[in-house]
Amino acid sequence: MTTAAFAAVDLGASSGRVVVGRLGDGKLELEVVHRFPNEPVRVGGTLHWDILSLYRGMIEGLRKAGPVTSIGIDSWAVDYGLIDASGALLGNPVHYRDARTDGIAGRIGDLYPVNGLQTLPFNTVYQLVAARETPQYRAARSLLLVPDLLAYWLTGQIGAEYTNASTTGLLDVRTREWSSSLISQLDLRADLLPPVRHPGEVIGYYEGTPVVAVGSHDTASAIVGVPAEGTDFAYISCGTWSLVGLELDEPVLSDASREANFTNEGGVDSTIRYLRNVMGLWPLQECLREWGSPSLPDLLREAADEPALAYVVDLDDPVFMPPGDMEGRLRKMAGLPAGAGRATITRCILDSLALAQRRAVRQARELSGRDVSKVHLVGGGALNELLCQLTADACGLPVLAGPVEATALGNLLVQARAAGVVEGGLDAMRALVRETQRIVRYEPRGDEAAWQAAAARAGR
């Protein structure tokens, strides 16, 4: 194994960063060389991503990274930009939390047998139906998901990376190509959708450096970075969202799977990410913002002393999706007394999130028939010791927390394999993660009857 440096551009819902990974001789070292904010902008009643600010932050980060072997880009899913015949962007991408898709999913028939996707109001397919009559849509020549748009600005090359394309609702989950039947059924334009490319392919070059397709949906990259052995594991990629599920070889398209709202998204090396989107740490993040960003470690210590499972809500309720007045909605839905303080609210959120994750793990196991003996929790949530312990208690399974930087690791490992610095499949890449990254084990110690009763109170 030779040593080389790679740059991972990793964009999250609230910030972006450029991470340099140095791999070789059994080592995998990360350095965050640049962080920059990702702040949505509301214009004329529509919530947009500030894509030019993200591009500027990416370029500054790549400058700070210095010479690297290649560059890979990942971000959240579903959102896109439209470009015209000259290659110009036709407006800032609309944010998935914008209200333009409200009610659209309910007016469209069952797409699950073809796309295998969980029904979420912001899926690209519903965004496109909402945009179908707009001047931008009519003028467009190509649709590019956020990582593909940024790669286009770096390289001039148009394409749709497979793992992110699989989240649009327009990809056939069996053929792994665009579904002409769905596109026709919804009266959408097939000519907007670029050719599908796969992780490991060279997209083009930026100032002489290869830009490589990775698992450009950040969850796909995060799952590469899960330090698992074997197949008997569930994963939780926990940040603003919690993506909870299993890694499978084939999709699960049963009626029970559809009714449970499980999704079959594409993963690296032709795997299937069989999962549910759970609301994640978004309610806590919103409360922290509303409270003026108090010390989270102090708040978590206080929350740990609060009575367990005293107040719980169904965090999957759409009422928690929009920004603004999160505390008020939590108080109302949980029946919190007027005197309940921030620690009580925080404990309510974390108990409720553990319940939601428990439900998703158990359903994934039942619907797939896959045995699960442990849960890997990666991403920012791995730093939240209280949440990790509550998740172990709720699931009744050991939780192995870490790495926090699973997404960047997965991005970098796919690049390194494409360059020949790392050899082998997912097992080999995950072995390197296990050998080089910190992982903390939490054993279950909860009362199963108490969790069952709490789940009933939350309506789950």
Image (tube, grey):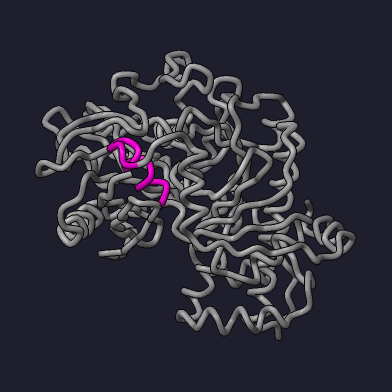
Task: Please state which of residues 354 and 384 is positioned toward the viewer in this rendering.
Answer: 384
Is 266 above or below relative to 442?
A: above
Asked if residue 46 can be seen in this view, the reply is no
Pick the front one: 189 or 245: 245
Q: Residue at x 9, y 44 (%)?
A: 207
**Residue under the point 59% across and 55% down:** 377
Q: Is residue 222 left or right of residue 139?
A: right
Where does residue 427 sit, x and y in percent of width and height?
52, 39
Decide: is 18 above or below 117.
below
Highlighted range, magenta? 409-421
Res 413 → quadrant: top left
Q: 375 or 301: nearer the eye?
A: 375
Judge left or right: residue 27 versus residue 9. Answer: right
Q: Where is residue 298 in the image (x, y as percent from the top left)?
A: 57, 84
Q: Quadrant of residue 108?
A: top right
326 sits left or right of 233 in the view: left
The quarter in which the N terminus is drawn is: top left
Considering the whole magenta stretch, tell me its main secondary structure: helix
